[in-house]
Amino acid sequence: MSHYLVPFSVLEQTIQGGQCADSPEVLYHYLNLTEEYAERLSITDATLLYQRVFNVLLDTVCDTSVATHWRQTCLDKVYLPLSHLKRLIVTYQDAKNYFKMEHNLRVLSHYFISSFEQ
């Protein structure tokens, strides 16, 4: 894959739309870029970034119009931003938000994993 500068939001749209379903490198690039950006941000802004990435991946997993193998790939990687968020927990509210996201992932992935197997 060539390393052209692509705006972050364009990468997100590409991932959510499943337009790169046969190129998981795009997803890996997005996740690596997220980590690079987060390193330069405050804890609050890094938290918001990781929440955004988590939501992009979870939304993709839940979108039945996207290719099943792409949804599965996103499901396999949705734990990365979640694990980064866990390390950024500072307040009780941070912990509460984290556990809510973790719960939503468990519930939604359980529901959508069964749709993968059909």
Image (cartoon, rainbow, N blue to C red):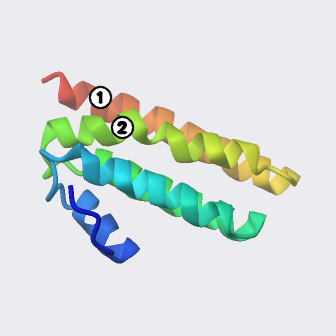
- The answer to whether one can see residue 62 in this image is no
Furthest residue toward top: 117
Residue 1 position within the rendered picture, expressed as x and y whole percent measured from the top left: 20, 55
Q: Between residues 109 and 32, which one lies in front from this camera angle?
A: 32
Measure how far apart labels 2 and 1 are at the Cα level: 9 Å
Q: Between residues 73 and 114, which one lies in front from this camera angle?
A: 73
Give me the residue at 75% from left, 69% from top: 42
- What residue is disc 1 on? 113
Residue 95 position within the rendered picture, expressed as x and y whole percent measured from the top left: 77, 47
As helix, strand or loop, the secondary structure at mark 2 comes to helix
Locate residue 73 relative to residue 38 in the image: left or right: left
- What residue is disc 2 on? 75
Closer to the eye: label 2 or 1: 2
Seen in the picture, residue 39 relative to 97 is either above or below; the reply is below
Q: Between residues 37 and 115, which one lies in front from this camera angle?
A: 37
Q: Do the residues labelled 2 and 1 touch (CB within 8 Å)?
A: yes
Give me the residue at 27% from left, 59% from top: 16
Corner quadrant of residue 109 = top left
Furthest residue toward right: 91
Locate residue 117 relative to residue 92 in the image: left or right: left
Corner quadrant of residue 2 = bottom left
As helix, strand or loop, the secondary structure at mark 1 comes to helix
Give me the residue at 27% from left, 35% from top: 72
Q: Which amino acid does label 1 sit on?
A: Ile
Give me the residue at 30% from left, 45% from top: 61
Locate residue 82 relative to residue 39 in the image: left or right: left
Q: Residues within 10 Å of mark 2 (few under 14, many from 20)?
A: many
Residue 100 position within the rendered picture, expressed as x and y whole percent measured from the top left: 63, 46
Seen in the picture, residue 29 relative to 108 is either above or below; the reply is below
Furthest residue toward front: 2
Q: What residue type is labelled 2?
A: Leu
